[in-house]
Image: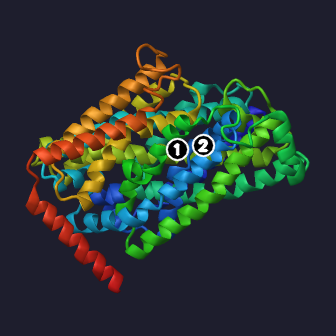
């Protein structure tokens, strides 16, 4: 595709998104506080929350990553993503509890909630830093998605580096304009563009390949076994478990997502957010998988599955204007995810590290530090993206695998009074190290000792081992140490009382 068309679409998007971000600024100056800037003053409507949640979650991972995963491994990618949607039902259990805790205790970050519940500053600091360690690479995945997209669609006339630089600059700018309000409003615009344009492309592509009847016959011919599991062997049982486990708990383990549970203005808006996201996600999953199959028909033998979407959009199957619109939607979604991660990590560094180290820091000073941290995190993500690692979907899951170590203390916060700070610290630190070592070993292709040729330990991925170690240490160490009984009882009784009141209403 001519790079002129691509740059024209990007410029138009930047203008509309910039205007939207600027108009999102509140007139009462609520962005001048930590709660206002990072949580939208806890006043987001259900529709805006649903669109923002969707754009934040379904980023470069979906139409580039999931399509690429389908291209590489076949229909197993559909099962993988549908399991994620099933995992989102955890929000039905934890969503109201996060929301109520945030309202009652004024939490800005999930790490702050953990530190309060386990009565230990170290818990807040360690969980915040663990989030940084694993989410910065996840941000880099989004930047890389934009780089691959623009490079592939332009026939390399736009370099990978140019795409990542553009995404980095836009993410910093939108995050700084008005904090979460800016991100939510631009997210909503992007989500609508994404779902409509991507669905229309599916119609054009399937018709261009002979219609629904011929489509799956051609998939079977060009990619034998791709419509069965394990198909070509990509989705072995251990690989499937390793990929899906982090996704099942994604909605509570990833702080850029769980922090959004603090933002709706009411419990009703929280429900609308969840239902809207589920509908959006189901449609988008079918779209992404279809794209992957279409690319396997039209472009067999690609060296990197992440090029499936760029090649498809630049092909004759998709009208140029529509291809540019979809490209803008994918790029905007990636920027949206980076925005959310930048805001979440900067709020965690500020609230859970800086504020813990300097308890007398005012709210205004915390906010200033948070804004300074945003570009720092963005630059670190950019440097990581420069590695140009392959298979975005797999990398996304690898980053989320490390965050599985957060799951036991989060569950314990609401459902296990016996949990202790020592249990949280040991499980988070050791579990995180286990994931990090296994992921590093896999990337270095070191397969000595108990590691197999895929870099797995005894046939299981890093997420499985990280979660197992975290659970064992959290439970075992907690049972050997003294729990903060008063706070545990307060938290438990408060939740029980408030949830009964809500049910009664």
Element under label 1?
helix
Q: Is residue 413 left or right of residue 202?
A: left
Looking at this view, name the residue that lies furthest to the bottom.
Answer: 505
Relative to residue 178, is residue 241 depicted above or below? above
Q: Which mark is residue 335?
A: 1
Residue found 46% across the figure and 44% down from its top: 245
State the residue at coordinates (20%, 37%).
Answer: 426
Q: Identify the residue position indicated by label 2 in the image.
A: 331
Are the residues at dot 1 and dot 2 in contact (C-beta closer than 8 Å)? yes
Residue in the foreground of this view, choosing between 453 and 129: 453
Label 2 Cα crowd, 10 Å radius (few <14 / some 14-19 / many 20+): many
Say which mark, if any, is on residue 35: none
SS of the residue at dot 2?
Answer: helix
Q: Considering depth in this image, is 364 or 195 the residue closer to the camera?
A: 195
Left or right, 165 with respect to 151, comes to left
Q: Is residue 357 visible?
A: yes
Circle 1 residues within 10 Å: few <14, some 14–19, many ≥20: many
């Amino acid at each position: 595709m001519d790079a002129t068309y691509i740059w024209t679409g990007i410029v138009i998007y930047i203008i509309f998104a910039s205007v939207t971000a600027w108009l999102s600024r509140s007139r009462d100056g609520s962005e001048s506080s930590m709660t206002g800037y990072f949580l939208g003053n806890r006043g987001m409507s259900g529709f805006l929350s649903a669109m923002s949640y969707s754009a934040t979650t379904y980023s470069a991972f979906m139409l580039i990553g999931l399509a690429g995963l389908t291209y590489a491994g076949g229909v197993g990618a559909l099962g993988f993503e549908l399991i994620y949607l099933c995992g989102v039902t955890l929000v039905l259990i934890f969503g109201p509890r996060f929301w109520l805790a945030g309202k009652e205790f004024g939490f800005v970050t999930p790490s702050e909630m953990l530190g309060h519940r386990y009565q230990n500053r170290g818990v807040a600091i360690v969980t915040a830093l663990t989030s940084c360690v694993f989410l910065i690479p996840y941000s880099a995945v989004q930047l890389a998605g934009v780089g691959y997209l623009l490079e592939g669609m332009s026939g390399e006339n736009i370099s990978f580096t140019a795409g990542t630089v553009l995404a980095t600059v836009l993410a910093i700018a939108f995050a700084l304009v008005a904090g979460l309000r800016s991100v939510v409003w631009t997210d909503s615009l992007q989500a609508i563009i994404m779902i409509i344009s991507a669905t229309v492309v599916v119609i054009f592509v399937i018709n261009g390949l002979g219609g629904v009847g011929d489509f799956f016959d051609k998939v079977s011919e060009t990619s034998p076994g791709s419509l069965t599991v394990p198909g070509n062997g990509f989705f072995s049982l251990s690989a499937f478990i390793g990929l899906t486990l982090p996704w099942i708990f994604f909605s509570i383990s990833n702080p850029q997502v769980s922090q959004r549970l603090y933002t709706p203005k009411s419990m009703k808006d929280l429900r609308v957010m969840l239902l809207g996201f589920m509908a959006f996600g189901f449609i988008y999953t079918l779209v992404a998988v279809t794209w992957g199959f279409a690319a396997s028909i039209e472009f067999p033998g690609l060296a990197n599955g992440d090029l499936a979407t760029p090649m498809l959009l630049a092909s004759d199957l998709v009208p140029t204007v529509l291809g540019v619109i979809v490209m803008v939607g994918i790029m905007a979604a990636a920027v949206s995810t980076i925005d959310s991660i930048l805001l979440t990590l900067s709020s965690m560094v500020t609230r859970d590290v800086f504020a813990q180290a300097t308890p007398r820091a005012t709210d205004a000073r915390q906010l200033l530090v948070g804004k300074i941290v945003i570009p720092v995190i963005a630059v670190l993500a950019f440097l990581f993206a420069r590695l140009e690692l392959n298979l975005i979907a797999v990398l996304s899951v690898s980053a989320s695998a490390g965050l599985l170590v957060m799951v036991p203390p989060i569950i314990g916060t609401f459902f296990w009074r016996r949990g202790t700070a020592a249990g949280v610290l040991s499980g988070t630190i050791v579990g995180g190290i286990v994931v990090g070592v296994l992921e590093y070993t896999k990337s270095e292709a070191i397969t000595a000792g108990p590691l197999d040729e895929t870099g797995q330990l005894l046939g299981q991925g890093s997420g499985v081992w990280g979660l197992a170690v975290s659970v064992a240490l959290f439970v075992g160490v907690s049972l050997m140490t003294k729990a903060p009984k008063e706070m545990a009882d307060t938290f438990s009784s408060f939740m029980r009382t408030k949830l009964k009141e809500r049910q009664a209403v």
